[in-house]
Amino acid sequence: MLTTTSGKCPGPKPIDPYKEATKQQMRFFYNRLSEKDRRLYAAIEALKLPYGGQSYIINILGCSNKTIINGTEELNNKDKIVQGRIRKKGGGRKLCLDTIDNIDTIFLEVIEDYTAGDPMAGNIKWTNSGLSKISRKMAEKGVDVSVVIVKQLLKKHNFKKRKAQKTTSIGYSKQRNEQFERIFELKAEYMASDNPVVSIDSKKKELSGNLYRKGTCYTTGIIKVYDHDFPYLADGPVNPFTIFDIKNNSAFVNIGTGKDTSEFVCDSIKYQWLNIG
């Protein structure tokens, strides 16, 4: 005779092979991996365990079911593992330039009155409107973008940066050419004589002391200076004055502390060449 008993059949016993300390180490390691390596690590840990191991790893690492599925597919098919990058090509959030339909139209409308170009190169344009101003005007027309997107739009539409050029003359002399010709004549005359021909230059006041200066030198120790170049940290101001003897190809640097630059120049030339004092 067949007999039955009432009650539910007990399910499989939940798995919990790892101690809490091990789980913490797994989470610590997982959170420091790249997106690609997280998929592979989560899949490897899930495949170690029997039925129910996938849900167990999801609870430990805090990842999604899709993460483990994608990682398992990559492990079973090594060709799916993207080399040299974290995500597959095309992954990630799309650019505003591709998702906002009228962004180019609004951009060109905003800068229409602030655009100039090169008549010899029609594909090169400039604008005298600032990035923030363009961003604000685009927001007024319903397209809210940052200055970073504005830069990308300027580059996309062949807008170029310009810099100041020293082309505006402050005056014109009718005898300018004659002046330069006379200078060349005097230079040739003095170069052929026994008189010295010197080039002089005086720099602005420099602060002397344990302050930072550009340049490097060969040394076995660390050069430590103040982290700020405040005037009160300096020993005092100095005026470097350089004299270059063109004929003899030699130079002399004189350091002064006075404020009268013209007097200092004359004294430097006198003491260097006449050697009197």
Image (cartoon, grey):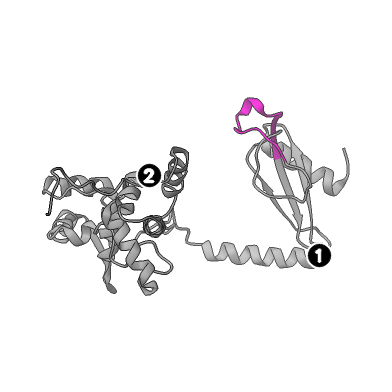
Crowd rating for badge 2 (residues with CA inside 10 Å; few <14, some 14–19, many 20+): few
**Residue in the picture at 22% in, 49% down:** 145
Q: Is residue 229 magenta?
A: yes
Taking depth in this image into account, of 229 and 35 the one nearest to the observer is 35
Image height of 20 relative to 31, above or below: above
- Can residue 124 be spotted in the picture? yes
Taking depth in this image into account, of 96 and 209 the one nearest to the observer is 96
Taking depth in this image into account, of 175 and 150 the one nearest to the observer is 150
- Can residue 159 be spotted in the picture? no
Using the rendered view, name the quadrant where residue 204 is placed.
Answer: top right
Q: Which residues are magenta?
A: 223-239
Q: Is residue 245 left or right of residue 122?
A: right
Q: Is residue 111 left or right of residue 45?
A: left
Disc 2 to disc 1, C-alpha distance: 100 Å
* Callout in the foreground (2, 1): 2
Q: Amino acid at mark 2?
A: Asp
**Residue in the picture at 28% in, 51% down:** 64
Q: Is residue 145 left or right of residue 81?
A: left
The residue tagged 1 is: 193
Residue reaching furthest right?
276
The residue tagged 2 is: 16
Q: Quadrant of the N terminus?
A: bottom left
Q: Is residue 167 magenta?
A: no
- Residue 267, how many percent across, how many down? 78, 40
